Every structure is written in structure tokens, then in C-alpha cells.
Amino acid sequence: MLSEAGEKAMTNSKQNPYLFIVGCQRSGTGLLRRILNAHPWIAMTYETHWIPRWFEERKGLTPEGFVTPELISLLVESPRFIRMELSREELEGLIKPGEPVSYSNFITGIFDLYGRARGKTLVGDKVPGYVRKIPTLHALWPKTRFVHLIRDGRDVCLSFTNWRKTRHINIGRHLTTWNEDPVSTTAMWWEWHVRLGRETGSLLGPELYYEISYESLVANPKKECQALCAFLGVPYDDVMLRFHEVQKTSAAGPGTNHACLPVTPGLRDWKRQMPATDIGQFEAVAGDLLDELGYARGVPCPELEVRRHAAVIRDLFTGYFRSRKRHQLPKHWEAA
């Protein structure tokens, strides 16, 4: 273990946001957030969602990317920012009169304040959808680490179909294919996020990008947490696996399930809980990615009609997001 002086010197040399947990929704990112938030050095914010979007839209910023007073007003009025528990006065203190403050430095200051209030120096964020924004976030903070949690898409599908928030994100709010075929649409959604995260993340190199399997995390939590801590450059602490004992239920963040449970395998099991027809539909769409990730198929040879239907869903899905030019698609899809 490091001495107190050594710990302080180590953490003070690192800039916030220190890490982002990303991945497809319903992949267990909430569990990983709670594990890391229990670490003595690391504080994890609630899902921000606005960080890359407001920068890309220059919301509350000058064209050059400097912070304006409007940004502070937008933040204090944002329901998501309220959970940061920071005051207007604290935000205004991050801006000195006559000295332009870049967006990246301003957000760093916010994360520093969040960590200081919790007695921690390293601060991260968990937003699954940021898996689509890795290039923007990397440009803002070139040393920030990304932890990409990947879960078997069929278990993700089971969770999606029982998730009350599904209709509030693009998959259920905009895609007509969701109403017609939620299984195939979820398969495309899962593949989109996983492939895009792997493609853009791999460009950063192993010092900044790390993949972790949900199945491995719940089967061997200590081993996986030790490896994750090595990637993050922090010492492993057993308290991480006792997060359910040391954190209040509310600390898990709004909208999370199983917040009080320890690491628990088998919360979803597509082999037992997913109808055979759904398995075939999902694998007809995303079977190649399941193969790449080492997940065994349940239906090795889907029927021709099922494969043709999968091709139709794929064309509709990619066509929709290709028409909305602000959405990046995996290069793998473009090459197919």
C-alpha cells in the first residue's frame, strides 16, 4: 500500500474526468459504477449525458469553445446537473474575470469539486451512450481512460424488453422497427454500440481503452477488479466488492435495479428465459458479433426467412441513423 504522501502525489498528477464507463445500455454499467464508486480513491458521478453534446452544439460556449455565463445558468437549471450537488457560486468560482476558460478545463473543475466534496481525488462518470462519443471526449481530455463493459447481447435484449425507459431513448422513441420487431431492433442497437466502442476505443491504445466482460466480472469479481485497478493505475481494495454494504441505496443513482445486491451472477439468463424464436431472430442479426466475442450461439443456422427478415431490419436501422448525420456508424457496417 502507498503511504498517504505517496497516494496524494499519485492522484494529484492525474486529471479529471479520470475515466468514463461506457457500453450498450443494460450491460451492467450501473453495477460497475457502484463497484468503482466504493474505491477509496474514486468518486463516480451520476450520468451526465450533456458533456459531449453541449460541447458539440457549443451550448453556453463561444464558437472557440470558451465558457460563457449562459452555461452556468443552463447547468444549475438542469435536472441531471442538480445531482452533482454543486452551487452556482461554486461554478462561478471556476471562472476568473478577464481570463477565458476552456470547456475542458471548466468540466475538469466541476469534477474536482465533486470529488473534493466526497474526499476523493479521482472522479469518473458512467454514461453508457458515451460509447458513441469516445472521439469527442478523447479530444477534450487526451489522458482520460475509457472502460467498455460488454455483455452478451441476448441478456441485454431480455433486460431491454423489461426496461420501462426503453421508449425514452432512440431505440423505442424513434425506430419504427421497435414496435414491429423489438428483438431484432435491440440486436442492431447492441451491435451498433459494441462495434463502435471497440473500433473507436482501440484507436486510443491499451493505456486508455479497456474492455471488460460482464460475464467475467460477475463470475470472478475479485480477479476482474484487480485487473481493472491495474489499468486505472490505482491499488485494488476489497471494499470495492462490498459496495452494497458501504453505499446507501440512493448512492446507486436513480433508475437502477438490484442496487442493494452484491455482485450476483444469473440475474438474466437468455438460455432459460428467452424464447427460441427470439434467440433465432437476435442471432440472425448479430450472430457474427456474438462469434467474435466468444459467445456460443443457441441457433447456429437460422432459417432462410429469418435471415431475410434480419437483412430488412438491418437496412432500416442503418438507413435511419445514416440519414441523421450526427450519428456515427461502425466502419464494419460501411464495409459490409
Image (cartoon, rainbow, N blue to C red):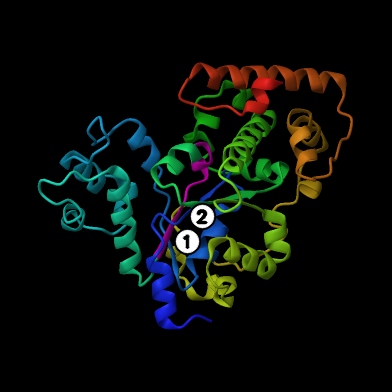
Residue at the far left in the pictured view: 97
Mark-to-mark CA distance, 1 and 2: 7 Å
- Bounds of the magenta span? 122-132
Q: How many marks?
A: 2
Name the amino acid type tagged 1: Ala
Secondary element type, mark 2: loop
Name the amino acid type tagged 2: Thr
* Front residue of this view, candidates 21 and 152: 21
* Front residue of this view, candidates 283 and 57: 57
In this figure, which residue is indicated by the disc labeled 1? 252
Instruction: Tell me residue 52's x, y (percent).
Output: 39, 39
Mark 1 is surrounded, within 10 Å at the Cα level, by few (under 14), some (14 to 19) or many (20 or more) other residues, namely: many
Q: Is residue 108 above or below residue 114?
A: above
* Front residue of this view, candidates 13 and 26: 13
Look at the numbered discs 1 and 2 and tell me whether their residues touch, using CB distance below 8 Å.
yes
Q: Is residue 236 above or below residue 123?
A: below
Instruction: Tell me residue 103's x, y (percent).
Output: 29, 43
Q: Identify the residue at horizontal 31%, vertical 68% (top origin).
A: 117
In this figure, which residue is indicated by the disc labeled 2? 256
Q: Identify the residue at horizontal 53%, vertical 27% (top origin).
A: 328
Instruction: Tell me residue 30's x, y (percent).
Output: 54, 55
Asked which quadrant contains residue 70, the reply is top left
Asked which quadrant contains residue 310, the reply is top right
Mark 2 is surrounded, within 10 Å at the Cα level, by few (under 14), some (14 to 19) or many (20 or more) other residues, namely: some
Instruction: Tell me residue 199's x, y (percent).
Output: 62, 36
Q: Horizontally, is 160 left or right of 307 in the view?
A: left
Q: Horizontally, is 315 left or right of 10 in the view?
A: right
Secondary element type, mark 1: helix
Q: Residue 49: which disc?
A: none
Quadrant in the picture for the C terminus: top right
Can residue 259 be seen from the camera position used here? no
- Asked whether 96 falls inside the magenta stretch, the response is no
